[in-house]
Amino acid sequence: MTDRPLTLMAVHAHPDDEATGTGGVLARYAAEGIRTVLVTCTDGACGDGPGGVKPGEAGHDPAAVAAMRRQELEASCEVLKVSHLEMLDYGDSGMMGWAANDAPGSFWTTPVDEAAARLADLVRKYRPDVVVTYDENGFYGHPDHIQANRITSRALELAGTAPKVYWTTAPRSMMARFGEVMRELGGEWEEPGSEESEMPEIGLPDEEITTWVDTTGFGGQKFDALAAHASQGENIFFLKMGKEKFTQLMGVETFLRVHDTTGAELPENDLFAGLR
C-alpha cells in the first residue's frame, strides 16, 4: 500500500482542449477522489482575440490573447476541480500550414526531446497511474496535438514509468449524430473524410474503441468548463447545443488504450480498471 493518490494526467495542446475531450473524466475522477493533473503545452496565442479578431488581423495581440486564455484555463480547471495545472507555455503553432508553425519558440519547432524532458520531470513529480493525450495524428492533424502525442510518448520513456496510456478518440456513430445535431441547429457541417470536407476522417469505428467512460453526471461541469473559454466561443460549436442536448450527445468519453500493465479486460468502462 502507498499514501500516493491514484493520479490521472492529461496532456493537452491548448487552453480549452482539456474540456472538449476530457472534461468529463477530469470532473468524474476528481469527484471520486483521484488526483487530476492537467498539462497544457502551448499559450493559445493563435486563438481569437476580443471581439473575435483573428490571428494576423489588425488588433490581434498574441500576448494579450495568451494572458486572457490562461485566465480562462484557470477558470475551467476550477469548474472541473483539476488538482494541478502545469503550463509548458510553448508558442501556439496555429493550424497546419500557418506561418506560426515555424515561428521561433513554437511548440511545433521545439525538439521533441527538449519538450519531453520537461514533461518527464512532471511525470516523475506526479507519478501518474493513467496518462491521456491525443493519437499520432493529433485527432485531426493539428500540429500542436501531434507534438503533444510525440512528447508524451518520449517523456514516459525518459521517466522510465509505465502507466496506463490512452489516446482520446470518438466513435464514428457519435460523429454521424453530431453532424445531424449541427445541421438541426442551422450550423454548417461537412462530414470529415467526405469529398466536401478538407478534414480527414476522424475517430474510430465503434468496435475498435477500447474504453467508454460514462460522464453523463458531469455533463454540466464539462459544458461550463467549455463556456469558461468565452473568448473562443465562436469556435466552440458544442456550446450552440445548450447544456441538455450537449450532455445527451457528449455524456460518454471514449479512448483507445495503447499501453497497459494491469491486464484489465477490454472493452472497459473505467480508465482506472485494474488499478482499484
Image (cartoon, rainbow, N blue to C red):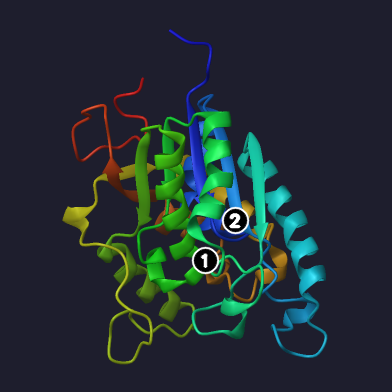
Residue 141, percent across and down?
41, 72
Q: Which mark is residue 41?
A: 2
| Residue ID at (60%, 61%) | 14
Q: Is residue 112 left or right of residue 137?
A: right
* Crowdedness near tag 2: few (<14), some (14–19) or many (≥20) residues, C-alpha within 10 Å: many
From the viewer's side, name the closer residue of 150 and 68: 150
Please say whether residue 153 is visible from this viewpoint: yes
User: Of the residues shown, which amino acid type is indicated by label 2?
Assistant: Cys
Vertical comparison of 169 with 241: above or below? above
Mark 2 residue element: strand
| Residue ID at (82%, 69%) | 64
Residue 96, percent across and down?
49, 79
Quadrant of the rendering where the C terminus is positioned:
top left
Mark 1 residue element: helix
Q: Is residue 199 left or right of residue 7?
A: left
Quarter assignment of residue 47: bottom right
Q: Is residue 94 left or right of residue 75?
A: left
Which residue is disc 1 drawn over?
144
Circles 1 and 2: CB atoms closer than 8 Å: yes
Residue 94, percent across and down?
58, 76
| Residue ID at (44%, 76%) | 182
Q: CA distance from mark 1 to mark 2?
A: 8 Å
Numbered label tally: 2
Please say whether residue 35 is visible from this viewpoint: no
Vertical comparison of 106 with 17: above or below? below
From the viewer's side, name the closer residue of 165 and 187: 165
